[in-house]
Amino acid sequence: MIVVTDSLDAIYNYRHVSPRLASSGQPTEAQLAAIAAKGFEVVINLALHDDPRYSLADEPGTVQGLGMDYVHIPVKFAQPTAADFSAFAAAMQQSQHRQVWVHCAANMRVTAFLGLYRVLHENWQEQEAFQLMHQLWQPDEVWSAFIAGMLADRRGYCRSS
């Protein structure tokens, strides 16, 4: 049994994005229980499960045991792809009327994907869409190129998604 001891504010790089959406770095098991206790219904994880420093031993089992749905989209930090983003966009659209918590190791992949999602699917202006990302980090060359490429190809992406 997991004891809820941590507040949401204690979760690494936690951000309240909207009434139905929050993001963060990797939560602990106790923090996942706090997330469930606050009414979140879906956890989307963009991190890999390959490093115990940045992942839990059984996050899918923990999340499902707390009564939430779990979606894992493993995005390699050094190699994000359009397919990764498409899977993220599909998960967000499938969960659009639910309370969603999105995380990765440090909330960097998440904030980049959320910025892209806002521009490509919700028609936000780029500056406003990426404000959350810029509060946490400035993308390196890999992520800057990925974001620029996705934005440059937005017409083709939006037609195919």
Image (cartoon, rainbow, N blue to C red):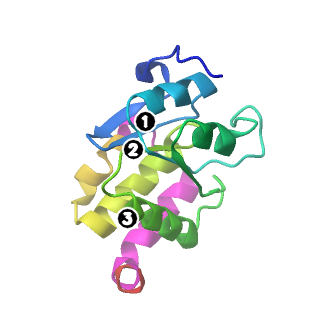
In this rendering, would 118 be left or right of 104? Answer: left
Regarding mark 3 in the picture, which secondary structure is present there? helix
Quarter of the picture holding the N terminus: top right
Residue matched to label 3: 93
- Residue found at x 73% / y 46%: 49
Residue 37 seen from this side = yes
Q: Which residue is labeled 2 in the image?
A: 133
State whether residue 153 is above or below residue 56. Answer: below
The reply to whether the magenta stretch includes residue 145 is yes
Judging depth in this view, the residue of 140 and 112 nearest the camera is: 112
Labelled pair 1, 2 in contact (Cβ < 8 Å) = yes
Viewer-nearest of discs 3 and 1: 3
Q: Which residues are the magenta region?
A: 134-157
Residue sticking out furthest to the top: 5
Q: Work out whether residue 5 or residue 159 is closer to the camera in this orientation and state it.
A: 5
Q: Position of residue 100 (x, y in %)?
A: 40, 46
Q: Residue at x 49, y 62 (%)?
A: 88
Real-space Cα separation, disc 3 to disc 1, in angstroms? 24 Å
The three-letter amino acid code for the residue at tag 1 is: Leu
Considering only vertical position in the picture, is 83 above or below 45? Answer: below
Which label sits in the foreground, 3 or 2? 3
Give the structural element (helix, strand or loop) at label 2.
helix
Of mark 3 and mark 1, the one earlier in the sequence is 3
- Report if residue 74 lies within the magenta region: no
- Give the residue type at disc 2: Met
Q: Residue at x 52, y 41 (%)?
A: 67
Residue 59 image position (x, y, % from top left): 66, 40
State the residue position of label 1.
Answer: 136
Whole-number angstrom distance, CA of label 3 to CA of label 2: 20 Å
Distance Cα–Cα, label 1 vs label 2: 5 Å
Marked residue nearer the N-terminal end (3 or 2): 3
Give the secondary structure at mark 1. helix
